[in-house]
Image (cartoon, grey):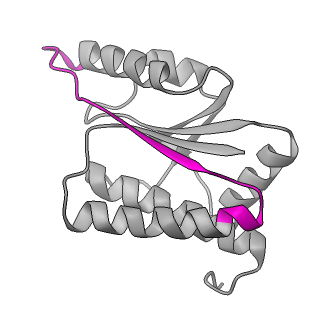
Amino acid sequence: MRIYIAAVGQLKNGAERDLFERYADRFAHQGQLVRIGPMTVVEVSESRARSADQRRKAEALTLLEKVPDDSLLVALDEKAKCLTSREFATFLQDRREAGTRTLALLLGGADGHGDAILHKAGRKLSLGRMTLPHGLARIVVAEQLYRAMTILSGHPYHRE
């Protein structure tokens, strides 16, 4: 099962990008062991529309254009359900076993997701109730993907 991370905004070069790439590289290795991957990262520019509603709508359409049509869309949304790391790993494993070819994790812009994504998403997940800076949210997603692979492969990285 391929993984897409499609995000509004771009990580700057430096510590954020380095840490994201560190977990992405670890994911690539561990994911091979459990037949999940490769990971593709797509960054889209923030909309310059005047209103938040217009920005959400424009960014949603741009994100949807960047992921394969056969993707199971997972919208990261602060109002959604939180999963434990083990539950997230099980979710990924279940999707793989169900024959999902591509799973796309979508990170909206500062104003959140537009209705086009929220209505099309097969799942909505929250990283927690606190607001995270956009770059940090993307790092958390990469780390949780890596952690999920270690859980599924029996690697000792995750401890309870």
Q: Is residue 60 magenta?
A: no
Left or right: 152, with 38 as reference point = right
Location of residue 41 by image quarter: top left
**Which quadrant holds residue 93?**
bottom right
Residue 115, x across and y down, in percent: 45, 17
**Dividing the picture into quarters, in which one does residue 57 lie?**
top left
Question: In the picture shown, does residue 107 fall above or below 16?
Answer: above
Q: Which residues are magenta?
A: 31-52
Is residue 38 in view from this perspective?
Answer: yes
In the visual, does 140 lie left or right of 19? right
Rendering coords of residue 77 (x, y %):
46, 39
Magenta segment includes 41: yes
In the image, taking residue 133 as reference, residue 49 lies left or right, namely left
Taking the spot 26% from the left edge, 12% from the top edge, the residue there is 54
Where residue 118 appears, as percent x and y from the top left, is 52, 24
| Residue 77 vertical placement versus 90 (above, below) | above
Q: Answer above or below: position of 78 versus 21.
A: above
Considering only vertical position in the picture, is 135 above or below 100?
A: below
- The quadrant of the rendering that contains the N terminus is top right
Q: Quadrant of the C terminus?
A: bottom right
Residue at the image point whose x is 66% and y is 57% from the top = 88
Q: Residue at x 63, y 81 (%)?
A: 158
| One can see residue 78 in this view | no
Give percent across and percent down for residue 19.
Answer: 34, 68
Q: How many marks?
A: 0
Q: Which residue lies at the image location 47% right of the left edge and 56% below the top edge? A: 141
Of residues 53 and 23, which is closer to you in this image? Answer: 23
